[in-house]
Structures are given as structure tokens and as C-alpha cells.
Amino acid sequence: MSENKSLLKLRKITKVFSKGTVDQVTALDKIDLNVTSGDYIAVIGSNGAGKTTLLNVIAGVYPPENGGKIIVNDKEVSRLSEYRRAEFVGRVYQDPHVGTAAKMTIEENMAMALLRGQPRGLRVATNKQRRELFRVALAPLGLGLENRLNALVGTLSGGQRQALALVMATLSKPAILLLDEHIATLDPRTAQIVLDLTDMIVTREKMTTIMVTHNMELALRYGNRLIMMHKGRIVVDMNQAQRADLTIHDLIVAFERASGEEFVDDNVLLRPGNVVGISDL
Amino acid sequence: MDPAAVGRLLSFSLYEGLAFGFVTIGVYLTFRVLAFPDLTVDGSFALGGAVAAVLIVNGVNPFLATLVALGAGLCAGLATSLLNTKLKIPALLASILVMVGLYSINLRVMMGRPNLPLLREVTIFSLASQLLGLETSIAYKLVVTGLLAVIVFFILNWFLRTEIGLALRATGDNEQMVRGAGVDTDKTTILGVSVANGLVAFSGGVVAQGQGFSDVGMGIGMIIMGLASVIIGEALFRPKGVARLLLAALGGTFVYRLVISVALRMGMRATDLKLITAVIVIIAMAIPYLQKRIRREWMPPAPRW
């Protein structure tokens, strides 16, 4: 993987919260990362590992510290604010309420997303041509949203809103898609639907994607690259071949070897369906 | 009550509903659309009256004077929104600061006088009465304010559905989503608060000409009147969509003014008016909470800002 082919480069990204107080936390510790165009990365790690902070830094929620650099398509974007970076970053949040506007209709939400990173003018935001485009984008969800363009988004269920948020995040085909535990709050059935949709859109558009998740099983099943974070550092980085026949147990072993610590995460251990028992550790 | 008196009462309330309706639309834009609690209104309403009056007294065309009043209101809203977005002063405090500051400015605009009479001056209403040859004052007042309301309605109904207008509405709904869509929410906030106060000052300019004077205290309680009208409009018309929301704002103001006029006729003292308006708003805002209390539902603590 030659470096200049990288779509996204992170150089020495550090983020410290509550600096200079007793609560000081190093959320990101001199992270270096190259993301190649077409990468579909699953990021795992326990609570406080820095996963969400990593997405926030890429999205521009806060600037990197101490001269850290973020480079997209050979252009440094470290100082660009969040709304300026939206041009090339689409994002789906854990909470379905964050990605959509409740008091506006589906088509108005879609119109907001359609113009991501483009100058907005005094044309009426929705028209026949755009509505058709929205219908085409919403139809594959199979939720019937394409026939309810005038429904207020606040009347949709959490799963429907998250599916809409996903379509909105990818509508303008941003260079990078960030998924921040985007199925964590959904019920299992809806979570599976949204997950399948994610896979469909990402694969179809060959979208470069970083998906943060708590769920190891998910991280092994989806994507073509796996990153494990611990205490603000990337401790494991596997490509498709390396993670091909991996089990959750292998992942935990890899984690312990890389971090030098025993793996403790009730979330993973107690989740039904995971074949890891306490004895495995 | 004889039918003529009822007609007078209705048409006068209609005139007031239209003239003050621009305040309600402004309050609706800040409080409901932007979720920006803006108290600049009391100051910018009087500012509009002061600017229009002073220009008219100095012989400026009254329509131009009313437009300049609108521009002055835009600047007041600009000040409040800049304090909030660029200096991070909470919206409520920022708007109170501008409102208080405007009191001094308004006195200066009116050349140090607390009251500026406009009788015998050329106003938008006296121009209309000459032009239309209408005798009764209420008839041409209705024609002029009705025309202005139609213009404002069409402009806003279009603007709030444009790409920029959509971003403005979404800002109050979900600021995070708007930034994620690539819009600078500082800019949409500044635009919205400025336009709202422009409308409020425009109303102040129209009302001053309608009542025949501008007074430095004419804005006191205007924010509460606007809020009461917004609440009444929402309760009566349950509006959906931009056009109906705008009409609900005007309708709410009309009903509010009608209720006040009836109460005054029935012997309520004019000086008690502000207290009654405040009580109406308190009741309207307390009802949802009390309903939840009765049903033992959980309510979050009230925001301090």
C-alpha cells in the first residue's frame, strides 16, 4: 500500500480531555492511520478506547492537538471546521435523533442532505426532479419511506429514522463514511435491516467507510479491514486476508498480546450468541 | 351591542392583528423555528417606531421610513445573534443586553424625547387615505396593513422553503444534523434572528404611524404579546407546513387583539393589560407540565437558559 494512494491520512493525532485537571484523559494518543480508497474498516475497542473520539477528529468536531495532521486526498484539512468537512465526510450517529430533523418532512431532510458541501441558494429546496431522486434512493430500504415524502420525520420509528439517516449520509456520495455504533440502540431485527442496508450501500458505491462498533462478531463479519483500539492507540490492524478465518477468541488473544492486558468487557462476554465464556480467557 | 359596534370592534382587531402580526411572525421565527429565545423584541419594536417617526418628522417618504425601520431592526437582531454565536453569550442574556442598550439608543434616535407625535405628518396611512379617497380611518388602515401582510406572507412563505430557508429551519430542529450537512449554523442563526427583528421593527414603524406617535416605551411587553399570539395561533389552527404556520401567527395575533379589545370594553383597565397577557402565557406554558404531572409522567427539569 503506497502512501500517496491513501484517501485519508492521520498523522500523530492526539486528543486530551480535561487537560490539567485530575480528570485528564488521553482519548487519542499520537494515532497514525492510512485509509485507502475503498477501505471498509471495522473499528473495535472497549469503552474509552477512543473510537468515537477518532471519528469526531476526522469529522472536525474538535481540531487535533500538538501539530497532528489530517490529510484527505493530499489536502490538509486539520483546521477546517465540522461544517466545512461535511463536503467529504458523511456520518451516521449512534442516536437516530442526531442524524435527522424531527420537525421537518422526509423530503426536506433529504434536501438538506443532498446539498451537503454545496453552496445553498434561493431556489425552492424540493422540486419534482429532486423528489424523484429521493424516491430512488429510499426505495431500496424496503420501508415504504419513498411513498411518505411529506411525513414528518418525528413520526417515524427509531429504526426508520436510522435507515433514513444512513441514506442521507450517503446521498451526496461523500469520500468518507463514518458510522458511529449506528445500530447499537436499535432492536435486533431493525439492527439487522440497517446493517444489511449499510453493507449494500457501502459495497454498491465502493464507499470508503469507517465503522465503529462494540460488537466483535460484527467486526469480523463486515468490512475488509479490522482495527482494534485500546487507550487511545491502534493496537491491532488487520487486512482482509489476515482476519479471514478469525474467531472472536482469536481477536481477544490478539488484543491481549498487543495491549499486554487482560481483556475485560462485559458487553462482549455477556452478549448472547457470543461463544466466548469466562473459561476461554 | 349593536352590529355597527361589533363591526368596528372586529375590523379594529383585524387591523391590529395584521399590524402586530409581524411581531408574532418574528417571535415565531426565533422561539419556534430557531429555538432561540430572543428578547430583543421589546427594544427592536420601539426602535422601529423611533426610526420611522424621526424620518417622517424630517420629511422622508413614509414607505421608505418604514423600510429603514426594518433595516434598523435587522441590525438589532444582528447584534444579538453576533453576541450569541461569536462571543458565546447565552441567547437569553445576549438579547436582554441588546434590549437594554436599545432603550438608550431609541431615546437618542428620537432626539432625546420620549415621545414623538406624528399627527399632521405624512404617514403610510395618510398617503393611502389620499390615494384611495377612503373616509373612515379603519378602512384605509385595513387596506394598507392587509397589503403589507400579503407581501410579507408571500416573501416568507417562499424564503422558508428555499435551500437557505430550509437550512434555517433545520438549525432550530437539529443543529448537529445541519452542521453535518455542511451548513455553518452560526450563519443561519444570525440570518434568522436578524430577519425576525427586522419584522418586529417593521411592525413598530407601522404601529407608530397607525397610532399617530412613537413612544420610547411602546415595546414593553411586546415579546410576551408575541408569545401569547404564537401560542393562541398554534392552539387554534394546529398548523402544519410553512404557509399555515405564518397564517396561524397572524390569526393568533388577531384573536389575541380581539380578546383584549373585548376585555377593555367590558371595563378592564388598560393598565392591567400587560399583567393579563403575562398570566395568559404562564397558563399556556404551565398546562403541558401540569397535564404530565397529573398523569405522573416524567418531565425534565426546566432549562435555566
Image (spheres, helix red, strand yellow):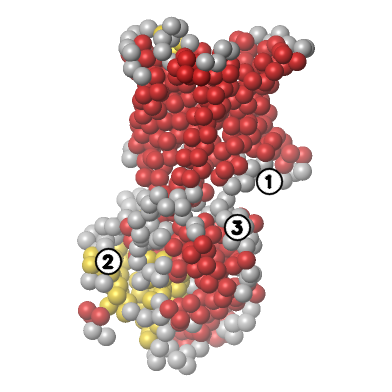
Q: Check if mark 1's residue and mark 2's residue have beta carbons within 8 Å.
A: no
Q: What is the crowding at mark 3: few (fewer than 14 residues within 10 Å), some, or many (at least 20)?
A: some
Question: For the residues marked 1 and 3, what is the alpha-carbon distance in whole angstroms?
Answer: 31 Å
Q: Of the residues shown, which amino acid type is indicated by label 3?
A: Asn
The disc placed on residue B298 is 1
Q: Check if mark 1's residue and mark 3's residue have beta carbons within 8 Å.
A: no
Residue marked by disc 2: A70
Q: Secondary structure at mark 1?
A: loop
B168 to B213, vertically: above or below: below
Residue B121 appears in which quarter of the rendering? top left
Mark whose residue sits in front, 1 or 2 = 2
- At horizontal 77% and vertical 43% (from top left) the residue drawn is B295
Upstream in the sequence, badge 2 or badge 3? 2
Chain holding disc 2: A
**Count of marks, rendered view:** 3
Query: Can residue B210 be seen?
Result: no
Mark whose residue sits in front, 2 or 3 = 3
- At horizontal 42% and vertical 31% (from top left) the residue drawn is B198
Q: What is the crowding at mark 1: few (fewer than 14 residues within 10 Å), some, or many (at least 20)?
A: few
Q: Of the residues shown, which amino acid type is indicated by label 2?
A: Ile
The quarter in which the N terminus of chain B is drawn is top right
Residue marked by disc 3: A150
Residue B286 appears in which quarter of the rendering? top right
The picture places residue A153, in percent across and down from the top left corner, at 59, 57
| Nearer the observer, A224 or B42 | B42
- At horizontal 62% and vertical 18% (from top left) the residue drawn is B12
Question: For the residues marked 2 and 3, what is the alpha-carbon distance in whole angstroms?
Answer: 39 Å
